[in-house]
Image (cartoon, helix red, strand yellow):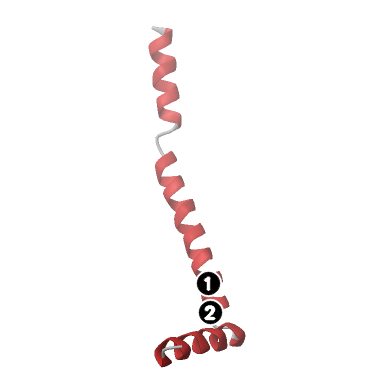
């Protein structure tokens, strides 16, 4: 009987773990996206990307 009670208690400790993990992954993904947006908006990166696209469209 004690073993069954301990098993139930252990199972209840992890009831909300999946939700917390999803929330952490979502926050991490949003932070990563914010960093990428900040990098892409910088003038140096915009210039480099513009040169890359221009070169690709020009065939060289």
Label at residue 36: 1
In the image, is residue 12 above or below residue 53? Answer: above
The residue sitting at 56% across, 85% down in the picture is: 48
**Number of marks drawn:** 2
Task: Residue at 41%, 39% (x, y): give it.
Answer: 16
Q: Nearer the viewer, residue 4 or 40?
A: 40
**Looking at the image, is 27 positioned above or below residue 9?**
below
User: Which residue corresponds to the image point at 52% horizontal and 89% vertical from the top-left?
Assistant: 51
Instruction: Categorize mark 1 by other alpha carbons within 10 Å: few (<14), some (14-19), many (20+).
Output: few
Q: From what the image shows, is residue 43 above or below residue 2? A: below
Label 2 neighbourhood size at 10 Å, few (<14), some (14-19), many (20+)? some
| Residue assigned mark 2 | 40
Image coordinates for residue 31, horizontal then vertical, percent = 53, 64
Name of the residue lying farthest toward the front: 60
Disc 1, SS: helix
Q: Which residue is drawn at 45% across and 23% down?
A: 10
Q: Name the image quarter holding the N terminus.
A: top left
Residue 7 locus on image (x, y percent) = 41, 18
Residue farthest to the top, as pictured? 1
Tag 2–tag 1 contact (CB < 8 Å): yes
Give x and y (percent) for residue 4. Answer: 38, 12
Helix, strand or loop under label 2: helix
Extreme-right residue of the structure: 44
Q: How far apart are marks 2 and 1 (CA)?
A: 6 Å
Say whether residue 47 is left or right of residue 16: right
Left/right of residue 18 with respect to residue 50 in the rendered view: left
Numbered mark located on residue 20 in the image? none
Which percent across, then down, holds residue 36? 53, 72
Considering depth in this image, is 40 or 15 the residue closer to the camera? Answer: 40
């Amino acid at each position: 009987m004690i073993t069954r009670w301990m098993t139930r208690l252990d199972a209840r400790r992890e009831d909300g773990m999946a939700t917390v993990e999803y929330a952490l992954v979502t926050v991490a993904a949003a932070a990563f996206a914010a960093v990428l947006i900040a990098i892409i908006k910088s003038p140096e990166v915009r210039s480099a990307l513009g040169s890359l696209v221009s070169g690709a469209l020009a065939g060289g």
